[in-house]
Image: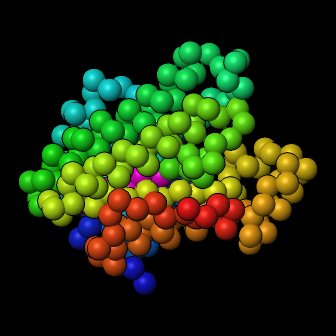
Amino acid sequence: MINLKNTNIILTGSTGGIGGAILDKLYASNAKILATGTNQTKLDNIKKNYENIITKKFDISNHELIEKFIDECNDQLENKIDVLINNAGITLDNLSIRMKDEDWNNVLNLNLTSSFMITKHVIKKMLKNKKGKIINITSIVGHTGNVGQANYSASKAGLIGMSKSLALEYGRKNIKINCVSPGFIKSEMTDKISEEYKKIMEDKISLGRFGKPDDVANVVAFLSSELSDYITGETIHVNGGMYFS
């Protein structure tokens, strides 16, 4: 079993389906977690159901407040951020010719620009500690594209390119940056898909089924641990064989 004792982790988007599974896995692995999100009720439930977890409500689209936010997180984690997991994200889907400029901008700003700004300020803290790991949750559509998701696909592809560049910049500083790229994972979002479309997607998956949030969480825990110390600049696909890089 992976042991993350004495590992301080910031997890964004902790109140969603995949975020919740990551939180469970990290908690079971003895990590010290600072969980963030925008839903105060869900954050309160996290606080109630898990011992010694720090929760912090924050909207990462508030770019002008991100540096202060990271400073506060650093203080709460006693000046030791070991792992950052950029999991927060949004979708605002539409066919490209119908997509509003604000829907393009909002998705790119939150999924990509906010993740970059959080990462930049966390790296400054990690440089002082001479180590760190950053895990960016991307998506299969960042590699394949998807109808009606030009904005979301672009944001996730951008995360992958950003991660590779940062891995090159900070590898010699003992900071590793990797991506986890889920395919179709059972969630509230996929539950809304029609049974006909589910069947079409399942037929494209080598394993013949959608994944579980735990499948993603297991890879995140691995990348957070010392077992992944010689891995950086990589994208690990969790898609049941739907896409091979």
Q: Residue furthest left?
A: 128
**Of residues 95 and 5, the one drawn nearer to the viewer in this rendering:** 95
Residue 150 percent across, percent down from the top left: 61, 32
Whether residue 94 is visible here, answered yes or no, is yes
Numbered range of the magenta stretch = 132-137
Above-or-below relation of 15 to 94? below
Say which residue appears at 37% left-offset and 34% top-offset.
Answer: 114
Q: Is residue 94 above or below residue 183?
A: above
x 85%, y 54%: residue: 200
Residue farthest along the right direction in this orientation: 196
Q: Nearer the viewer, residue 199 or 41?
A: 199
Residue 59 shows in this picture: no
- The residue shown at (44%, 65%) is 220
Residue 78: give x, y in percent of width and height: 15, 55
For the stretch drawn in magenta, what is the main secondary structure?
A: strand
Instruction: Give yes or no for residue 186 being in the magenta stretch.
Output: no
Q: Quadrant of the N terminus?
A: bottom left
Classify residue 193 as left or right of residue 90: right
Viewer-nearest residue: 96 or 4: 96
Give the residue at x 28% y 32%: 66
Nearer to us in this view, 54 or 1: 1
Q: Name the quarter where the C terminus is drawn.
A: bottom right
Tally of numbered tags: 0
Q: Position of residue 134 (x, y in %)?
A: 32, 56
